[in-house]
Image (cartoon, grey):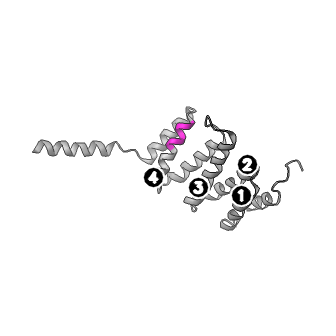
């Protein structure tokens, strides 16, 4: 009976010690980035968001994912698909973590990608207006207003 109890306790300890933390996933993802293993990095950052959504690392992980997609580093994704994912991840930061330090910049970047990369001006305008409404004192408000004013205007004009 004693041996069963000891085995049970040891099993719980070993299983409990095997659980990764959000920091473990973040560190692994950073190592993946350093090794240019971008798909693995995205997967590990996504684990932070999925398994530890209330952690301080979750909004940072979403930001890292968005940046990876923005730099078009995932193989077998067209530039268009990569940028659509990028904008979506930036928007998720605002949607899930509006009080995060990254939320204002991420929301602005979602609009910027929509306007300047995907040329989806209606969506960009909505995002920029949401940004101005939610973060009226942010330093990027002037840029957002300029972006709205120049939606669809070629850069060389």
Q: Image point 67% across, 45% down: which residue?
A: 83
Label 2–label 1 contact, CB within 8 A: yes
* Disc 4 versus disc 2: nearer the observer: 2
**Is residue 49 on the magenta stretch?**
no
Label 4–label 1 contact, CB within 8 A: no
- CA distance for labels 3 and 2: 18 Å
* Disc 3 versus disc 2: nearer the observer: 2
Q: Give the percent coordinates (x, y) of residue 75.
A: 61, 34
- CA distance for labels 3 and 1: 15 Å
Q: Earlier in the sequence, mark 4 or mark 2?
A: 4
Q: Which mark is residue 118?
A: 2
Q: Give the percent coordinates (x, y) of residue 32.
A: 53, 35
Q: Which residues are magenta?
A: 38-44
Q: Earlier in the sequence, mark 4 or mark 1?
A: 4
Q: Which residue is mark 1?
A: 123
Q: Residue furthest left?
A: 1
* Disc 4 versus disc 1: nearer the observer: 1
Q: Which residue is mark 4?
A: 52
Q: Give the percent coordinates (x, y) of residue 89.
A: 60, 51
- CA distance for labels 4 and 2: 31 Å
- CA distance for labels 4 and 1: 30 Å
Q: Which mark is residue 92?
A: 3
* Disc 3 versus disc 4: nearer the observer: 3
């Amino acid at each position: 009976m004693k041996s069963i109890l000891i085995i049970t306790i040891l099993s719980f300890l070993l299983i409990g010690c095997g659980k990764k933390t959000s920091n473990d996933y973040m560190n692994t993802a950073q190592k993946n980035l350093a090794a240019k293993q971008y798909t693995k990095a995205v997967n590990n950052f996504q684990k932070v968001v999925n398994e530890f959504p209330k952690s301080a690392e979750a909004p940072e992980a979403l930001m890292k994912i968005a940046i990876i997609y923005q730099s078009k580093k995932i193989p077998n994704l067209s530039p268009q698909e990569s940028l659509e994912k990028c904008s979506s991840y930036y928007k998720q930061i605002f949607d899930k973590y509006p009080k995060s330090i990254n939320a204002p910049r991420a929301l602005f970047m979602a609009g910027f990608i929509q306007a300047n990369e995907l040329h989806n001006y209606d969506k960009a305008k909505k995002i920029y207006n949401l940004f101005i409404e939610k973060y009226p004192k942010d330093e990027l408000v002037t840029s957002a207003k300029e972006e709205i004013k120049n939606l669809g205007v070629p850069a060389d004009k």
